[in-house]
Image (cartoon, helix red, strand yellow):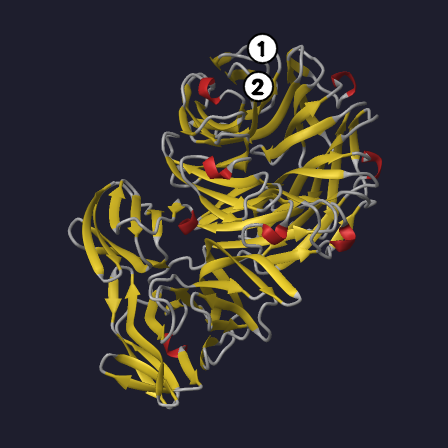
Amino acid sequence: MLMWVISTVSIFKGDAGASALFVKNEGQIKGDVLFHSIHPFGVAITDDGRLLFGGTALSFGAEPKEVVGDGEAPTTFSYFAKGKSIGALPTYRRVILREVYPNIDAVLTAERGGRFELQLLIGPGGNPEDVMLKVEGGEPVVREDGLYVLRGGAEALKISDLKAYQGADEVAVNIRIEGNVMRFDVEDYDPSATLVIDPIFTLIFASSGGDEVRALALDSSGNVLVAGSVGDLSSFISPSDTFGSLSGSDVFVSKLSPDLSTVIATAVVGGSGNDYLLGLAVGPSGNIFITGFTSNSGSFAPDRVVFGNSGFGYDVFVTKLSSDLSQHLGTAILTSSLDDKPGGLTFDSSGNVIVAGWTEYVSTFAPHDTIFGGTGSYDAFVAKLDNSLTTLIANVIVGSSDMDRSFAVAIGEDGSVYIAGATYNSSAFSDSRTTFGNPGGEDVFITRLSSDLHTHLGTAIVASLFFDEAHALTVRGDRVLLAGWTEAGASFSEDRTIIGRAGYTDVFITALTADLSTHVATAIVASSKEDKAHAVAVRESGEVLVAGWTYNPDSFSVDRQIEGSPGLSDAFITTLDSTLSAHISTVILAGDTLDGAEALLPLVDGVLVGGWTGNALSFATADTVLGTLGSKDGFLVLLSESLGVSEERSVDAPVGVEVSGNTLRITLSHSAYVGYNVHSADGRLLRRVSLGYLPAGRYEYRMDLPRGVYLLKVRVGDEVRTIKAVI
């Protein structure tokens, strides 16, 4: 059940033409105030959840779990007084009091002319009967035109326009006064209507060193696995277990509860040198596998099996941990006398481990029995290890006479193995190849091998005239999707859809048929500066997600929603339609220095994004910090379906409602409640969705309806429109 109960609270002061805003208290006001209003001053929210209107207060009889600002405005607030100056504080359009009661949030939205909208968001499991508003410093009195709070006989507050909504439907609600306490009587409503309430949640994985989140996965219980590198273990999350001679940078795996509220366990694995994580996967029996590279393989993990002749540089590790992260079950080292690094890992149908990457010295690298193409300064490899990591079943080299590196690996539905990366000699790469585009200095490759790795089934080269690299790969049905970057987006591949403005380096997403013989589509997502992609995924709906970072968020893609304070580079998550021809949304996760996204994990009702930030204090919405903040910290962000939309605020736009395919577009010139009902063509109610009380702006929402004809009943404030939608 989701219901919004909304009332207007008017204070008898303020400029009728000014837009009220909230600012966080950073010391400019003494006492327990967390947020206060400007234009007009005099409204405040305390840390225990009381709403102060001058000398009058409204309280809920319970403390919220947290109080946060929401809807950052372009205006900043500076405070100057004798002996104190506080500059450029962000301002917010509303303040959210989360969980004032179980599954009930309160939202105070600032309006013009001393008006504030108080909304109660009653979510699944929330009970309207729990809600109470206690008046302090005044007396509630009911009159014909609303409820007033009198103070000293004068009108201090007016509470009017009490309404409740579910989807597009208004629900009858009344105020009941018991002394100085107001309660709400809600009539008939649907307790089964549900919706994700919190649109964004962020966890920061931090130490005083450099930290990253590089990989994400789900276990069979829905727990979230987060893996990356930690620069200073002494100031990181207290690990449940450690494995190896830890020093310098080490790798970590944390298991979180499905709602991200609890760290169930954390394991740290390392050696006496520096170790970095690049891949994570859950095995068929639930054990957890990680891969990365280590500068001291001789001390990495408690014990290990070594394949190859170790020398200088980095070596590849593959480590197996128990499902609860409490036991080290094995480590394999793949090595040569120079540098070796992995690009990822996966499993075949028998549970054997497939790991791909590149080696700098093939002659001394782990034993290999097949070479496709030639060998050069760097060569791509694909290795198959048994599930216990004690036996190297197969290891093949794919290369040319120049530099070739594999950055990603995936398994096809028929068991074939795909690797993707970049080659400096595409005309001689592998045994044979099909080329899409015009080869240049460095080109994207994708190679398909048989499940035993011994047969070359095809290679595709996707190229531009300059330098191109693929860093992400996924297989979905009869299509293979690649993502990475190109230095010539306008000429990359055979043909392309350009989303944004092609610049120095652009993100690409390319779809090929599973046999690699046909180019299906390419999308270029770009800004006027440098953009790179490191992760790609496909939703159940077929929509394509891509993530990475951009050096110009203000011009990236065609429109975007920015969370946080943009800096030198910022993380992005872009959603495209299944054909790669239409941009659905882009969300920028920003801090004021360097930020980037490295991993994606689609969920039923949202998406998890992992990466790194140079300043967690300014990054997106850093709700929870695990550890001690440093110069570079890992992040995990949960975006709900409602943030899979593009929002561009425009206070002068007219109110508008438009349906285009599966997208509902809403334009608001003022704050208003928005919700919609979906009916079948014969009038049956299929779904109620409450989008909430939204500030002025332009919004897009994916409805995710199957093909068919529908009638949409859309409510914007008091106005209800019925629209026919053909999906």
Answer whether residue 105 is visible to the viewer in this image. no
Residue 364 or 494: which is nearer the viewer? 494
Residue found 80% across the figure and 39% down from its top: 300
Residue 456 or 505: which is nearer the viewer? 505
Residue found 39% across the figure and 44% down from its top: 646
Query: Which numbered disc flags the more N-terminal residue, 2 or 1?
Result: 1
Pick the quarter of the image with the N terminus. Answer: bottom left
Disc 2 marks which residue? Answer: 467
Pick the quarter of the image with the C terminus. Answer: top left
Rendered position, 555 above or below 33: above
Q: Is residue 410 left or right of residue 148?
A: right
User: How far across and down, in percent of the image, does residue 489 sit?
Assistant: 48, 22
Label 2 SS = loop
Q: Name the residue type under label 2.
A: Phe
Residue found 41% across the figure and 69% down from its top: 125
Dot 2: few (<14), some (14–19), or many (≥20) neighbours within 10 Å? many
Residue found 29% across the figure and 57% down from its top: 675
User: How far across and down, in percent of the image, does residue 504 sit?
Assistant: 53, 25
Q: CA distance from mark 2 to mark 1?
A: 22 Å
Disc 1 marks which residue? Answer: 431
Q: Name the residue type under label 1.
A: Asp
Rendered position, 672 above or below 282: below
